[in-house]
Amino acid sequence: MNGKEISNYPENSNIVWKNNKLQCSINYVNDKPTYVVKFGNNFSNQVVSSKSPSDATTLFHNQINQGVNTRTSGVLLFGLHLESIHQYRIKPHKKRILKPVNEASHSTLTKRAKSMTKQVLDDFTNISKNHYNPVDKPILEKVQFSVNNYKFKVNVNENLITKECKNEAMVMVVDNGQISRDAYRKLTTIEDELPREWTIAEKRTQINIRMNDRIKINTVIMPQHMDINSNESYDIFDPEVIEEVTTSVGKGGKRSIKDVLKFIVPNLIKRGVLNLHEPIISIRISGDGRNVGKKVKHVMITFAILEDIENIHNPNYHYTVVLYPGLENYESLDILTISFREELQELKEIGININGVNWTINMYFSSDWKFLTICLGFNSANSLFFCPWCTITKKEISDIKKKWLISKQIDNINQYNGHHSTSLFNMISLENWIPDELHIMLRITDRLWSLLLHEIEETGYFNDVAREIIVKEMNRIKVNFHFWQEKECQSWSFTSLMG
């Protein structure tokens, strides 16, 4: 196309390309181009497009050649091949002045760091040839530098498998150490080698998704919220845990014991804890409640593998199957353990098949006295009929000539005096219901200690000197113990040895 070039680009960014039949121009408004084609007598007609030169040429042909599919190059029609533009392209330009780092955006800083790292990698590759044998395979792992107090670290040739293992290990450390998200963020500001907090959060989410596929967690809606005893001391202080449990009041969670067994048994076989030639698994079911903050108490039921003697006292090897916010009472446990009890009954009758091996399950129940009697549908320990295993009464407890044996039957236990309901876990023989020795010992010690202090008080020696001696001795044996005086009655209270 021959025509007249009307342009002094780049001094004037508006370009005009004119011949005898039409005039094409590119006008810039707020740094955005507008493409105009004028034609007809004295160029009285025009089409305008803000999209592209090709769109303007299409509009032009639709005006003059209606119904005819005619095309013209937008580049040629608008003179983007002009000599002035060509000269500007080949003309050497002044070096662009970069923005200071404190004025540049995050994406710009990231691009600069990656571009610089690429050049450093090229230089490293070339220089290393002069210092190392090719068989040594020198590797640049990372580039780290700072600019005006802005620190940059770019990983090069990072091993993704190692990175994933490190992130999973960090999730384990954070969870086992009960490190809150806010505390971990502060740690990462001090030590930049630590993975970022959002990376750990994403990895935890991925692990939870994978574990939920293997061992699904189901939610159970509780019929009503249980009243909380605000006078009880609380055991958990983590604000994140307290908030999560508080917001979940009225909902309980449960997992399938069969799913958990299918997940852990292969590893127990690998460790030599279980024997494939004697496919027997002994499980201990337990439960307890804890106060979370001052508002909510949560109750959990767990089970452990008794053959795993090395880890029987390790809480990481006690697997939770039921967890709910509320109080320890028969009604709540009855609702939350329906499916759990059905699975236990099935495990007792037919066992469980894992990788082609059918395992026989022996079951035991062990907990503190309170939780044990709740699950047995039994009265409290100070009732007339106080024994869950035999029919002894308070009046007969002093008769040491009698031999009291386990005489009750688990199947009809609610027919005995003292039992108000059937046992929640009637698939477990009564001989296998064992109270936790530690709780019994602590309770006995606590009662004896209370009697001792009461006797000291009656003799008149319960003064500041005596209290100071007792506290110092408790501190010496690493027991947290304090005395305090009640404001209303002026009587002295002390720390319970029950914990």
Image: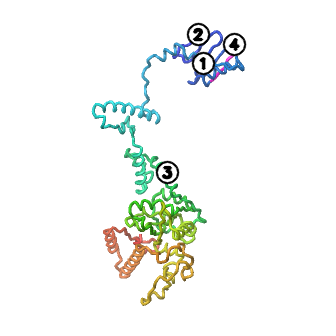
Q: Is residue 295 visible?
A: no
Check disc 4 and report the residue beneath it: 40
Given the image, on which type of amino acid does mark 2 rest? Lys
Question: Split into 4 quadrants, where in the image is the N terminus?
Answer: top right
Q: Is residue 33 visible?
A: yes
- As measured in the structure, the alpha-carbon distance from the residue carrying label 4 to the one carrying label 1 is 20 Å
Residue 4: which disc?
Answer: 2
**Residue 280, magenta (yes or no):** no
Check disc 3 and report the residue beneath it: 205
Give the number of the mark in front: 1 or 2: 1
Give the number of the mark in front: 4 or 1: 1
The reply to whether dot 4 and dot 2 touch (C-beta < 8 Å) is: no
Q: Left or right of 245: which side holds 499?
A: left
Question: Split into 4 quadrants, where in the image is the C terminus?
Answer: bottom left
The reply to whether dot 2 and dot 3 touch (C-beta < 8 Å) is: no
**Where residue 322 sits in the image (x, y, percent)?**
52, 64
Residue drawn at the location 34% of the way across and 30% of the way down: 123
The reply to whether dot 1 and dot 2 touch (C-beta < 8 Å) is: no
Check disc 1 and report the residue beneath it: 73
Mark 1 or mark 3: name the one nearer the start of the chain: 1
- As measured in the structure, the alpha-carbon distance from the residue carrying label 3 to the one carrying label 4 is 67 Å
Mark 3 or mark 4: name the one nearer the start of the chain: 4
